[in-house]
Amino acid sequence: MKVVVTGGSGFLGRTLAATLLRRGELTGPSGRAERIDSLVLFDAVGPTEAVGPGDARVEVVVGDVADADQVRALVDRDDTSVFHLASMVSYGCELDFDAALRVNLDGGRAVLEACRSRGGSCRLVFSSSIAAFGGAAMPDVVDDTTKLTPETTYGTTKAICELLVNDYTRKGYLDGRTARLPTVVVRPGRPNAAASSWVSGIVREPLNGEECVVPVDRTTRVPLSGYRTIVDNLVRLHEADGAALGDDRSCNLPALAVTVQDMIEALRRTADRPLGPITVRPDPAILEIYRGWARRSAFPRAIALGLTVDESLERIIQTYIDDFLAPPAPARRSVSSSDGPS
Amino acid sequence: MKVVVTGGSGFLGRTLAATLLRRGELTGPSGRAERIDSLVLFDAVGPTEAVGPGDARVEVVVGDVADADQVRALVDRDDTSVFHLASMVSYGCELDFDAALRVNLDGGRAVLEACRSRGGSCRLVFSSSIAAFGGAAMPDVVDDTTKLTPETTYGTTKAICELLVNDYTRKGYLDGRTARLPTVVVRPGRPNAAASSWVSGIVREPLNGEECVVPVDRTTRVPLSGYRTIVDNLVRLHEADGAALGDDRSCNLPALAVTVQDMIEALRRTADRPLGPITVRPDPAILEIYRGWARRSAFPRAIALGLTVDESLERIIQTYIDDFLAPPAPARRSVSSSDGPS
């Protein structure tokens, strides 16, 4: 079978792709495990580092997700599964409304139509976001049946695509499943235009000996999940029994709800090297976005489907250290305690 | 000020237009009542009967609501209010998915963009539908905070446009308000492609001495409202204080939740002439649609905003008789009782 990952150059797309290449198979239209013989990574730009270098199954395609013809050309086999991760991020959507609708809404429609063109055999996993919740009427804990009243254009486009995934599935045009992602940590590399970018930064920058400026309050609570768990859960959602999902194909992915202070303390406990400083300096624009977002989530559908929960914040941080950081230089280990985060 | 009514050739559009012409004014961008000097009725076809014949304020424009340029040309003044009623109906959307997305979703976006082009001064009232509710998780009574998980493409497009109205309003691109309409009765004329067409037919056809075939069970319960109340509430929603609406700009319109049997009995009590027969013959396709729809609704936001509730089913039927039927011929009055609905 063929797998298409949109947003395939992004961190999550590359991590998912590497996992799929290792795994080697997915449930195909037959309902049985089928060998993945083709994996297409589609994105607006090429990946900064190769995915599965030299692996003949991998193809990188650079293009525009809102170009329906281009996207349809990717789904050229009936036995295709699509992981639709391509998206403009939250703060970027606030800055450019038109681009947000083009990439996230028109792009979503292009992906749905591409799947539909195969006559109903394709399975689709769409990455929505907990940012699809929001607003004055939002309860303290958002669950799978909470009304989506997003307070950002990003969340709006995600909520709209959730509705479309449900209706395309109801019509038999595809077999869609939507994962509502919490904040994904710890993303390697540099900060991005997501309003949640600092949630990775608060771990990543200090471990690199750099300063992290946190644009929210110390008590701000964020539902988050480690990237390995997220990718594992995306695959599990793909594999899940569609009938068990029912008519609303969306579920909250499992998440830990932790505060800024929790993150700082977990980082102190876990770090194996001197840490750069953490400066809490609330930014009104980011605070405003966070005011409209969910602080805690429940995820009964995900648990019923067999998806998994992160063990702890410390485990998430340790995984990042193991995956992305070189062992600390022996000479520097002894100075760590006095140079902790502020 | 200028008022644009999309779907202006439809029954509700024409009734609203006549009401606005009589009323003569609406709250404009200034926040004060302003005189309506231009009323545009926009629709895919012209109206079968003139609205306000000879009234210099009225202009009929025939066009495609999904044609963004055409729709933008209608909103050519900052002091424009738009009532966006244009829509493919429920069963029609089930029959033609692509047209449903084009007319209801792309059309909705064209209307929103047309308003946005005036820089934020336009007020918009969008007619959504109680069909935006649905699905296995739907509670017995749907209210303003119930999650929209529609089970029809019609409901899906309505739910999507509700999200867009919220976000365009949040961004300050327009001042949007969404009315979630129950089934509108009693529509004059002929049946249409709405799955709810029979709800008007069950009153209209027998009063015309014709048979009505009801495609659902006698116990099927439907939230409905008379057209005069609906139009009055659309105007009240336009006039309402936007701040009182908050960040979720949608509200259920008030409705009576009545069964097929209730309707038959109310018709018997109210009719002033011999009635044609009513045949209950459930149609699996229509029943299936009704299974996914809400049976009862609550409407606390509408009541808080000062919208009104129908007095009774009998009052709704009597209004239809008064507005659309000629007095019964004296010779036929005496034979009415034995010729009631079955």
Image (cartoon, coloured by chain):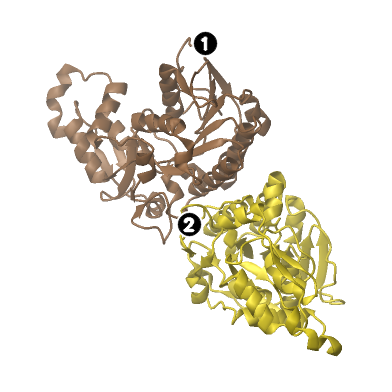
Chain colours: A brown, B yellow
Residue A230 appears at what percent x and percent y? 38, 33
Dots 2 and 1 on the same chain: no
The quadrant of the rendering that contains the C terminus of chain B is: bottom right
Disc number placed over residue B46 in the picture, else none: none
Answer with left or right where residue B114 lies relative to residue B301.
right
Q: Secondary structure at mark 2?
A: loop
* Residue shown at the point (75%, 50%) measured from the top left: B67
Q: What is the quadrant of residue A291 in the picture?
A: bottom left
Is B306 positioned to the left or the right of A232 in the image? right
Around disc 1, counting alpha carbons within 10 Å, would you say few (fewer than 14), some (14 to 19), or many (20 or more)? few
Task: Check whether the beta carbons of the residues at disc 2 and disc 1 lie within 8 A of each other.
Answer: no
Foreground: A186 or A338?
A: A186
Identify the chain of the residue marked 2, using the numbered disc in the image. Answer: B
Q: Nearer the viewer, residue A326 or B154?
A: B154
The residue that mark 1 highlights is A56
In the image, farthest residue toward the front: B338
> Where's residue A78, x and y in %?
61, 25
Identity of the residue furthest to the right in this view? B54
In this orientation, which residue lies closer to the viewer: B147 or A255?
Answer: B147
For residue B57, above or below residue A193: below
Q: Position of residue B111 (x, y in %)?
A: 68, 56
Seen in the picture, residue B7 relative to A197 is either above or below; the reply is: below
In the image, residue A270 lies at what x, y percent?
19, 31
For the residues labelled 2 and 1, the Cα–Cα distance comes to 48 Å
Badge 2 is on which residue? B138
